Image: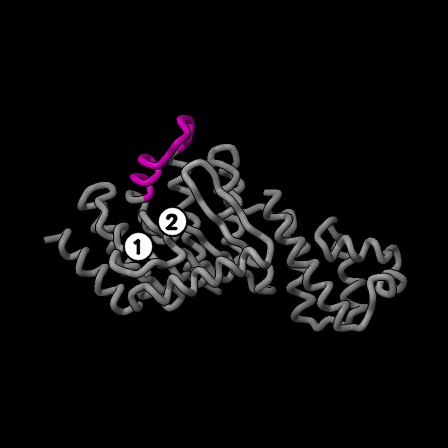
């Protein structure tokens, strides 16, 4: 959960810096006006180097004349710093990267993803997910059932009051594959069709005949957060490990890649037709 706590601190620190700058104060000037603070402490808080207590954040927000909406949002970040969600019960049963992903998705406002070989986890059925995990797992001690349960539970973000927005580009090879057998694959494509019709989900298919595009270097996902675009994260998953990219210039690089990928993929309506036709072939 260290990554999750770091992300929350970065989100809080970035907003505190923005408010201080808008108030026309230097770090030293702000530190001098709040009891128990200094310029150094202000700088460390803004750069996510230390945890900040709720009462200290309130003092800074009062100094910066933050409005109620932003104040409430930032205090939620502080209160949630040690938040425990359903995913915590799986600590020890699944790897830390899986727990981190579930926690971060619960706070994200959007996910954009490109997948080469499989349907994205947020759009999978349980049987399809089980087949994928069984075939792609490289660790002999992995708890397959726990991984499938986590993958299914993660999907609750698609139907929460402010649902996660998902934009997925999937290579057509994943649609033509026979993961789990025809019956499992047909049910998976049914699920994909249903999800693609949700107002918060866009699905595009990347055709085999598409010209060279940045997705050819591998699958990745971008998690967007509601506070600031420069707090977004990128996940690059491989068979052996998961790599997170946090630096704004790195995230911007992947955002540019995704824009190019969507431009080369089929349109949303054509993609839905493509998936439906393949589903129909499997059910004949």
Mark closer to the chain start, 1 or 2: 2
At 82% from the left and 62% from the top, the residue drawn is 27
Residue 92 x %, y %: 51, 33
Viewer-proximal residue among 165 and 152: 165
Is residue 95 shown above or below 236?
above
Query: In the current view of this chain or complex, which residue is farthest to the top?
Result: 140
Residue 106 x %, y %: 51, 54
Viewer-proximal residue among 59 and 257: 257
State which region is magenta.
Answer: 129-143
Residue 142 x %, y %: 42, 31
SS label for mark 2: helix
Does residue 50 appear left or right of residue 269 in this picture? right
Marks 1, 2: nearer the viewer: 1
Q: Image quarter for residue 141?
A: top left
Is residue 189 shown above or below 127?
below
The residue labelled by disc 2 is: 121
The quadrant of the picture occupied by the N terminus is top right
Q: Is residue 175 magenta?
A: no
SS label for mark 1: strand
Query: In the current view of this chain or complex, which residue is farthest to the left?
Result: 284
The answer to whether one can see residue 165 in this image is yes
**How far is mark 1 from mark 2, CA to CA?**
14 Å
Tell me if mark 1 has few (under 14), some (14-19) or many (20+) residues whose alpha carbon lies within 10 angstroms of its own.
many
At 82% from the left and 54% from the top, the residue drawn is 41
Q: Image quarter for residue 199?
A: bottom left
The residue labelled by disc 1 is: 171
């Amino acid at each position: 959960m260290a990554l999750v706590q770091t992300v929350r601190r970065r989100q809080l620190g970035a907003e505190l810096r923005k408010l201080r700058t808008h108030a026309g104060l230097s770090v030293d000037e702000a530190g001098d006006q709040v009891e128990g603070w200094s310029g150094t402490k202000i700088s460390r808080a803004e750069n996510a180097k230390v945890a900040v207590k709720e009462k200290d954040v309130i003092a800074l927000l009062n100094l910066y004349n933050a409005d109620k909406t932003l104040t409430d949002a930032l205090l939620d970040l502080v209160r949630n710093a040690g938040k425990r969600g359903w995913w915590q019960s799986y600590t020890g049963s699944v790897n830390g990267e899986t727990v981190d992903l579930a926690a971060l998705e619960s706070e994200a406002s959007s996910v954009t993803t490109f997948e080469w070989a499989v349907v994205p986890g947020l759009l999978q059925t349980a049987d399809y997910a089980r087949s994928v995990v069984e075939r792609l797992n490289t660790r002999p001690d992995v708890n397959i059932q726990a991984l499938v349960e986590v993958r299914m539970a993660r999907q609750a973000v698609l139907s929460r009051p402010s649902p996660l927005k998902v934009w997925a580009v999937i290579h057509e090879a994943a649609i033509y594959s026979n993961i789990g057998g025809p019956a499992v694959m047909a049910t998976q494509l049914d699920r994909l069709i249903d999800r693609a019709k949700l107002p918060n989900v866009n699905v595009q298919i990347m055709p085999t005949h598409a010209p060279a595009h940045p997705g050819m270097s591998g699958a990745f996902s971008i998690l967007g957060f509601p506070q600031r675009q420069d707090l977004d994260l990128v996940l690059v998953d491989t068979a052996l490990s998961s790599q997170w990219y946090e630096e704004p210039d790195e995230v911007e690089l992947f955002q540019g890649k995704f824009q190019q990928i969507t431009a080369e993929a089929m349109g949303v309506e054509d993609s839905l037709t493509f998936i439906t036709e393949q589903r129909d072939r499997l059910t004949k």
